Image (tube, helix red, strand yellow):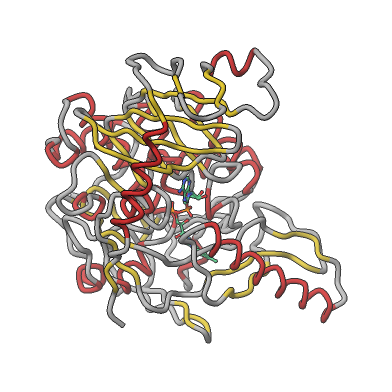
Amino acid sequence: MFPMSDSKNTDRRTFLQTSAAAFAIASTTDIVLAADSNTDADVISEADCDKTQTQAGKIETLVSKVDVLVVGGGTAGTIAAIQAGRAGAKTLILERNSQLGGTGTTGGVAFPGLFDAWGKQIIKGIGWELVSDSVELDGGPLPDFSKVPARHWQNQVYTNQFLYAILAEEKCEKAGVQIAYYEFPQAIQKTADGWQVDCIGFGTQRRVLCKQIIDCTGGAEVVGMLGLPRLREKETQPGSMLFKIGAHHRPGREQVHRLYVHGADSSNSRTVTRANLTGRKEVLKKVRQTKKQLMHLQPETGFRESYRIVGETMITVDDYTSGKIFDDAIAYAFYPVDIHTKTGVRPKPLKRGTVPTIPLGALIPKDSKNIMVAGRCLCSDRLANSGLRVQASCMAMGQAAGVAAALAVQKNTTPLAVPLEEIHRTLKAHGAIVPS
Ligand SMILES: Cc1cc2nc3c(=O)[nH]c(=O)nc-3n(C[C@H](O)[C@H](O)[C@H](O)COP(=O)(O)OP(=O)(O)OC[C@H]3O[C@@H](n4cnc5c(N)ncnc54)[C@H](O)[C@@H]3O)c2cc1C
């Protein structure tokens, strides 16, 4: 099946940019007063929002001046933001849902992998720190990575999704990362030294002035808003709704039940609504069939596949299955080629000893400046993507993007122009494993 190019963005972009003219702001400091001339907006500083009671019916207008904006607080985005913050960048993370962790928490895929390959740990750093801290606090077991398991999934790490999400918030706070839930970008444009991103939430609108963007939305949504090309298959892998019936769910100790949601599409609120309604209807059917109690239900469908960027480097399935070490490799990855279809999945394991790598170029949209992606939307062909999309790899990409963005800010340059040795050195200083 051939990927389609995403070409419908120009009109939408024009509309969004025009509507964004409603903001009229002059600001150089962080979170300052904003003047909005044509809406019923409250002009208020964020610090004051906490102290004063917002008037009913008024929209708060905020301005955030930051170095790095991370859009999407999921598997990759959480790690990207913590890393950027720890590397000294003033960082804001926007998440359209109510918590951090994305597919690993809200979607319920609380069994991240794979941090190891062939008897050795190959991914560490901030993702591993968060996963292992949450397992330790939860009193759960960690797999023994010195053993090569009979089946790849046996070395996935069971995490308590609730604890993971709270610990992620704590680590963001300690790294000085500001979190904005229920917000998402509505319009974006270039400025002299970066970006102006106008965001909307309920009862709030926020103008973000930033130097670097890391798009961790899963489907490269910011890249799409910019009109940069993205790839998508005509038919994508099914999503899944995760639930448990008939027995208590023990978080951090087991997987839950799951059923496929065919046609699940994470593109926008309409398609996500449809996937959730379809998934929940199927759960209801199961409850009626089994006459057992519904004990656990995730609030959102988990999505396996959507858009991928057209990047500086495309990872092909041959690169992936041969374990190509890219010149600009920033992390290892490990998982079988794993395409789910209408009838299920037959993972194709990698040949013994093979460990693929991820190049920085796969995180950078082609011919772009000052925007990167991390997570399942990296530039890869469909088969390579089916292995690269897993959580440990997404976390490693997030960490690398966080480092590249923070260094680009420090050096007043673009991520691609940051010397690779410095990216590697900083990654290692923050605990990551870098391919050699
Ligand atoms: C059912 C299922 C089973 C899986 N099994 C495994 C497994 O066994 N092991 C494994 O490691 N991986 C597994 N995966 C894959 C893995 O979980 C995902 O590919 C990975 O978590 C994706 O990470 P991400 O950061 O790219 O996206 P996500 O974790 O989905 O994060 C994207 C975040 O961006 C937010 N967002 C989206 N759009 C916007 C916007 N416009 N503004 C603000 N926020 C936005 C979303 O709310 C979300 O929080 C599975 C996936 C599914 C669905």
- Residue at the spot x=14%, y=51% of the render? 367
Q: Position of residue 407 (x, y in %)?
A: 22, 30
Q: Position of residue 130 (x, y in %)?
A: 50, 40
Q: Quadrant of the N terminus?
A: bottom left
**Occupied quadrant, residue 232:** bottom left
- Residue at the spot x=23%, y=60% of the render? 310
Tally the numbered discs: 0
Which of the pair 351/202 is nearer the observer?
A: 202
In this picture, is 429 found above or below 276? Answer: above
Which of the pair 350/419 is nearer the observer?
A: 419
Farthest-out residue, bottom: 343
Which of the pair 20/112 is nearer the observer?
A: 20
- Residue at the spot x=24%, y=47% of the render? 330
Q: Is residue 204 left or right of residue 160?
A: left
Q: Position of residue 324 (x, y in %)?
A: 18, 64
**Occupied quadrant, residue 356:** bottom left
Farthest-out residue, front: 38
In this picture, is 258 found above or below 89? Answer: below
- Residue at the spot x=69%, y=17% of the render? 53
Q: Position of residue 45 (x, y in %)?
A: 51, 16
In this picture, is 395 found above or below 200? Answer: below
Q: Is residue 310 left or right of residue 432?
A: left
In this picture, is 289 found above or below 248? Answer: below
Q: Is residue 132 left or right of residue 19?
A: right
Which of the pair 53/22 is nearer the observer?
A: 22
